[in-house]
Image (cartoon, helix red, strand yellow):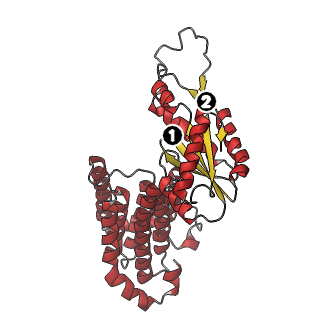
Amino acid sequence: MAAAVAVPVDRLDTLTGPYAPIVYGAGALLAAVFHRSRVVLAVVALGLLDLGAPGSGNLFVALGAFHVGLFGALANTRDRGVRSRAGLLQFGIGAALITLVGAVLQDPVALATFGDARLLPDGWSAWSRLPDVVLVGGVVSLLLGVLAVHRFRGPVERGLLWSQALVFVALHPSVGEYRSSFLLMAAGLVLTLSVLEQSYFMAYRDELTRLPARRALMRDLAEASGVYTIAMVDVDHFKKFNDTHGHDVGDQVLQLVATRLATSRVGSAYRYGGEEFTLVFAGLAREDAVAPADEVRQAVEEATFSLRSWRRPRKRPSGAKDAKPKPKKRARTLSVTVSIGLADSSAGDGSPEAILKKADQALYRAKENGRNRVSV
């Protein structure tokens, strides 16, 4: 947006003309490679809007308003893969809608009806210089985008929200053809970058627990300096727990433990793999890290969650109102414990691998000594 305002219009012309197809083509191709069906559809839609309508006045405003709404809807769906049946259906529905809306708005009568529709009291939308439908629809669509960011908290949702904002600004009559085209290209670049950010997120974040993953741990340890302590954390009897209650309950346990580790006041939590986690206490020697590590251990031990019986029906059976109510049983609660092993940066040769190995050895000592404890 800042560049669209700062760069002279004659310079924008040299940027938007030759480079627009490259931006949209490369963005759609990259999104297809990473199976981001929503981004493929959004970038293709932007390209069609940019290459076909910026200088067409009211038609551009109407089509742009539809694109803002489309992006808000896409933000609240999920990527289905480009070659999957669901992904092709998602793309097909979006393409059909774009084609249908474009065909309808080509009719001068329909376009005039769209622009003259009154949804707000007289004078409310005069300041915006946009039709009521565009103003109301744009605000609602942006709110849908904000809702998606709040629900899913993913890079693609944020990219779609920023793209909505850029397209919405491009619709204003004072922006002009070249600046509108530049803003649409910026929206395409934002979506392309969101694909790269999502790939980074997948590589460095654990999807189940939302903690940084092992790759992020090794990167941070390689950059660490000074004194620090590594805590290896393992869920006690996790295999037995998993076999008894099922993998879905086991996933809940891992999420619960991750939540408690993330609340550490002085340690950074990571998912190491399986039922193992890691805490890094920057600036603390091993002896100083015992107390905060034990606080985390106690927090996990005190946390409980209710187990839903697999025999309990998801819907109330027919005739249940007439049946004699049975005494309510208290929901079964479960809890877990963790064992923790500590080693600081003075261990071994001081390399991250050596410190992790020492922390792992301390973890095994904690398990041999009865579990649910911190060992150094």
Q: Secondary structure at mark 1?
A: loop
* Nearer the observer, 367 or 269: 367
Disc 2 marks a residue whose amino acid type is Ser
Residue 316 image position (x, y, % from top left):
49, 20
Element at badge 2?
Answer: loop
Point out the tag, 2 or 1, that comes first from the N-terminus: 1
Q: Which residue is pictured at 72% across the width and 50% down the height?
A: 287
Residue 264 visible? The answer is: yes
Q: Which residue is mark 2?
A: 335
Looking at the image, which residue sits at the far top?
324
Report the amino acid beneath label 1. Answer: Glu
Is 376 situated above or below 95? Answer: above
Side of 74 where 266 appears, left or right: right
Q: Residue at x 30, y 71 (%)?
A: 25
Q: Which mark is residue 127?
A: none
Residue under the point 28% across and 57% down: 96
Q: Are marks 2 and 1 in contact (CB under 8 Å)?
A: no
User: Residue 150: x, y in percent?
Assistant: 55, 53
* Residue that protrudes farthest toward the front in the picture: 348
**Image position, residue 32 (x, y; %):** 31, 61
Residue neighbourhood size for the residue with mark 1, other residues' Cα within 10 Å, grouped as few (<14), some (14–19), many (≥20): some
Residue named by callout 1: 275
